[in-house]
Image (spheres, coloured by chain):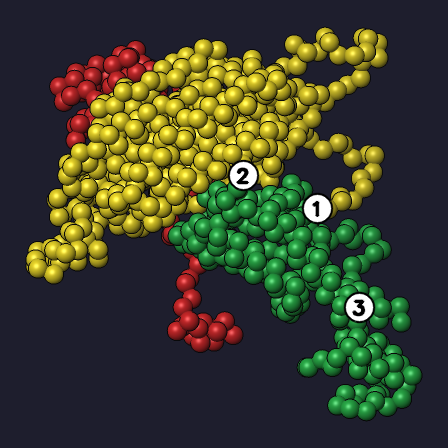
């Protein structure tokens, strides 16, 4: 990780795209403007962070903007990690896809689309990857119910049997 | 359902999306060699074959849509999700301690690694100090699990290539490893042995002796497997020179682990960013040269020897000390204290009913699993349940490399490459 | 219903077919046609031949090579050298469902996979059995959430083997229990309970052949 001052310098390099920096427990995060994500990642690649380790989504329910996408970047020569974060609201969940520059983001962006509903513009093949193709809803959102079967205990058996009739 | 016969007036149905996409696939490199002169060249079509989720060669429920021209693979589309279990969603519903068995079942061959990644993230958020003895015990179990995972990989891959006896030999060794796990934690798989702050219990008497017996036997057996397979002409012909991919493309695709090391890049998180006292041990990183299937096979086989070395060093240097952190706010107090100390009783009660609370923050903790970089992202919001747990699974990202590897190669090479890729569908689908 | 010894049964059957009254406790001399045939079948023919066939079937299960998740690893170990499934004769794991008669659903069944498992089960030929291995397919297991389906919901299961994952010994216990089930009492009525008779893939609607059970065939022809 770059330390706190390194993070501030990095954020200054990114200019107005960087909205906020967080340095917590030796982890450096930069919150960026969603519209400029490709440019930000390209600039960080120029700084040496050439490996995109992970792209994953977060749901910040109930704080708005709700849906977050986190890009974990790794600099292999200096063994340095930095995280780039962006947040989009649920009513306009559009982010530009970075798959053209970083081919590893292909399946990972599909998973975020499947689980959270974030639409990645410019993605070559944006379909559901984990759920069935015709599934409705985005399961990983915090307000999606967890589902499951009710557990029927023997002591409740009579109640269930009569509820079935 | 047989569709009703249509009359000849109606126009032919529009091309499906997939057919339209495949029209752009370039078949020119092989086109000139097609049998038949220019006069009677018939129109040809690419064949889309479905390697369904149920197939003996797909290592789990992986579905591949393969577009073939004769026996040459022109395009490959993996379809996953057939064992999606909603692990990450379930983890949001449980206390931090209870998430450990949930997350263990993700990549079901490297269960200790799943637990380690998650626990590492939580420990980093809590800033909990893990005692050295616990770290060494963790390393022993992690490396034993790495050997066990490579043994199943070897067994199932050899089964795909036709060498059925290797499968039974590998299971024989794996039984020894699972016996050791059963000795230390009581269960063979998904043991819940790692806990936040250390390990749940110290190793019993007799574990060290049995482990040493195993360590004496394992390198000989691995040598036997190498001898059998390396002298087999069929295995060599199927693996040597098939489906190579260079390190630059692999890095672009996010591939790590033995696949990247086979292509020549010696990136290993145990050496680059050591965690859990890996810096105390001396071991080498096997690296390949060409990046074909044979290199991937040889790298994993060599890693078994290195893991044996690490376990030996860890066992020899195992320090005395507690097996879990002494911070009672995070780890359960030992049972004998519950009878005498009121604070211990209260801590036990709070930890078991509600669990510890983690201050709000985010953490990403990467480790080196048998398949590559396994990272766990945990976001906490101050309560006793995590707000988001995401496992960056190596197989999920490595699967994207299957298509570039197999394009332009024979379908039999595709089978061998899928075996050498070592995909674990539990990790891919989570 | 206690069965008379073999000699008594055959004497009774011969007397019945000749139409004369039977002495003894089985006073059912006035059966005709198919009822008489069924009576004879149940009492005389449900003997050594059926028992032999049941014994042969139970000792030669051909399991379908089918594993989903972690339980598949323990299934491998059940076929491995220590807990050798070949001792019992079940080592012939077939890849094609058409050649298998036992499906061991090893692992968690997601909603995307459930219709596929049902298709596999339909493609298997009668008589066929299903073992639900592990907690995830028997009940919901560790993961009680939106993504999983217990196996009971879409196919009739004979034996549930609990565990997460069940040890190879536990799986063998379940398989041997199934073997005993097939040997002693092949038809406990569960097929009628689940409506599972004739569960092969349905033929096309234009085909004239409609699948029936052997008994219905006889009733139609009689």
Residue at horizontal 55%, vertical 22%? B229
Residue at horizontal 34%, vertical 39%? B210
How far across and down, in percent of the image, does residue C13 sit? Answer: 84, 80
Please state which of residues B21 and B209 is positioned toward the viewer in this rendering. B209
**What is the CA distance from the residue labelled 2 to the residue labelled 3?**
39 Å
The red chain is A
Chain holding disc 1: C
Q: How crowded is mark 2: few (under 14 residues within 10 Å), some or many (20 or more)?
A: many
Chain C: its colour in the image is green
Q: Do labels 1 and 2 share a chain?
A: no
Please state which of residues C20 and A50 is positioned toward the viewer in this rendering. C20
Residue at horizontal 69%, vertical 26%? B47
Q: Is residue A12 above or below residue C6?
A: above
Question: From this viewpoint, is residue B376 visible?
Answer: no
Question: From this viewpoint, is residue C178 visible?
Answer: yes
**What is the CA distance from the residue labelled 1 to the residue labelled 2?**
20 Å
Q: Name the residue under label 1.
A: C99
> Which dot, 1 or 3, sits closer to the camera?
1
Q: Is residue C45 above or below residue C175?
A: below
Please state which of residues B370 and B5 is positioned toward the viewer in this rendering. B370
Q: How crowded is mark 1: few (under 14 residues within 10 Å), some or many (20 or more)?
A: some
Location of residue B184 (image quadrant): top left
The yellow chain is B
Residue at horizontal 39%, vertical 17%? B286
At mark 3, the secondary structure is helix
Q: Mark 3 points at which residue?
A: C215
Q: Name the residue under label 2.
A: B61
């Amino acid at each position: 990780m770059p330390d706190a001052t390194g993070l501030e310098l990095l954020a200054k390099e990114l200019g107005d795209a960087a909205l906020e920096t967080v340095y917590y427990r030796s982890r450096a995060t930069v919150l960026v403007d969603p519209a400029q994500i490709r440019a930000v990642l390209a600039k960080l690649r120029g700084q040496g962070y050439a490996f995109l380790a992970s792209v994953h989504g977060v749901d910040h329910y109930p704080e708005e903007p709700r849906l977050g996408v986190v890009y974990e970047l790794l600099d292999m020569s200096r063994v340095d990690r930095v995280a780039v974060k962006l947040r989009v609201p649920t009513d306009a969940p559009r982010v530009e896809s970075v798959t053209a520059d970083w081919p590893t983001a292909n399946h990972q962006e599909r998973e975020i689309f499947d689980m959270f509903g974030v639409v990645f513009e410019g993605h070559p093949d944006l379909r559901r990857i984990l759920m069935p193709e015709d599934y409705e809803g985005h399961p990983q959102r915090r307000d999606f119910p967890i589902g499951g079967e009710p557990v029927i205990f023997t002591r409740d058996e009579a109640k269930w049997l009569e509820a079935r009739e | 359902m047989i569709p009703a016969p249509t009359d000849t007036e109606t126009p032919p149905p529009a091309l499906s999306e997939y057919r339209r996409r495949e029209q752009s696939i370039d078949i020119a490199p092989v086109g000139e060699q097609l049998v038949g002169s220019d006069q009677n060249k018939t129109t040809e079509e690419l064949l889309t074959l479905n390697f369904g989720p149920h197939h003996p060669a797909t290592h789990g429920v992986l579905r591949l849509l393969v577009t073939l021209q004769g026996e040459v693979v022109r395009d490959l589309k993996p379809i996953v999700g057939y064992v999606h279990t909603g692990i990450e969603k379930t983890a949001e519903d449980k206390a931090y301690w209870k998430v450990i068995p949930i997350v263990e079942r993700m990549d079901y061959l490297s269960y200790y690694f799943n637990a380690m990644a998650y626990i590492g993230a939580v420990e980093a958020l809590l800033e909990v100090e893990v005692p050295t003895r616990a770290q060494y015990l963790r390393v022993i179990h992690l490396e034993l699990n790495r050997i066990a995972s490579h043994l199943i990989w070897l067994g199932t891959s050899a089964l795909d290539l036709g060498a059925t006896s290797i499968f039974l030999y590998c299971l024989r060794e794996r039984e020894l490893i699972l016996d050791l796990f059963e000795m230390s934690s009581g269960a063979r798989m998904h043991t819940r042995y790692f806990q936040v702050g250390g390990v749940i219990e110290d190793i019993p008497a007799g574990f060290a002796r049995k482990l040493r017996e195993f360590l004496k036997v394992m390198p000989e057996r691995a040598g036997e497997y190498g001898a059998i397979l390396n002298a087999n002409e069929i295995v060599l012909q199927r693996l040597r020179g098939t489906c190579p991919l260079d390190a630059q493309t692999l890095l672009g695709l996010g591939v790590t682990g033995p696949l990247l090391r086979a292509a020549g890049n010696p990136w290993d998180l145990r050496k680059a960013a050591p965690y859990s006292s890996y810096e105390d041990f001396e071991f080498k990183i096997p690296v390949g040269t060409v990046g074909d299937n044979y290199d991937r096979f040889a790298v994993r086989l060599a890693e078994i020897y290195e893991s044996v070395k690490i376990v030996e060093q860890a066992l020899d240097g195992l320090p005395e000390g507690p097996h879990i952190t002494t911070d009672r706010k995070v780890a359960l107090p030992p049972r004998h204290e519950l009878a005498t100390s009121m604070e211990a009783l209260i801590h036990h009660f709070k930890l078991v009913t509600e669990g510890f609370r983690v201050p709000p923050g985010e953490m990403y903790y990467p480790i080196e699993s048998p398949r590559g970089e396994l990272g766990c992202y945990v976001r906490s919001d101050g309560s006793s349940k995590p707000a988001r747990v995401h496992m960056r699974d190596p197989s999920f990202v490595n699967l994207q490399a299957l298509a570039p590897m197999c394009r332009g190669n024979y379908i039999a090479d595709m089978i061998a490459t899928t075996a050498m890729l070592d995909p674990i569908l539990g990790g891919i689908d989570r | 219903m206690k069965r008379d010894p073999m000699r008594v049964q055959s004497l009774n059957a011969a007397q019945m077919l000749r139409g004369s009254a039977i002495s003894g406790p089985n006073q059912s001399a006035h059966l005709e046609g198919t009822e008489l045939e069924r009576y004879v079948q149940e009492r005389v023919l449900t003997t050594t031949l059926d028992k032999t066939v049941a014994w042969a079937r139970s000792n030669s299960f051909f399991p379908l090579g089918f594993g989903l998740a972690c339980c598949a690893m323990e299934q491998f170990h059940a076929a491995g050298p220590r807990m050798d499934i070949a001792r019992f004769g079940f080592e012939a794991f077939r890849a094609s469902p058409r050649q298998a008669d036992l499906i061991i659903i090893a692992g968690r069944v997601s909603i995307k996979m459930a219709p596929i498992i049902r298709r596999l089960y339909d493609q298997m030929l009668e008589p066929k059995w299903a073992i639900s291995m592990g907690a995830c397919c028997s009940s919901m297991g560790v993961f009680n959430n939106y993504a999983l389906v217990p196996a009971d919901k879409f196919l009739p299961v004979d034996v549930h083997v609990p565990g997460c994952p069940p040890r190879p010994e536990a799986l063998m216990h379940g398989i041997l229990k199934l073997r005993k089930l097939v040997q002693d009492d092949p038809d406990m009525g569960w097929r009628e309970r689940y409506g599972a008779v004739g569960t092969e893939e349905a033929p096309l609607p234009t085909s004239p052949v409609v699948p029936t059970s052997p008994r219905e065939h006889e009733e139609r022809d009689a």
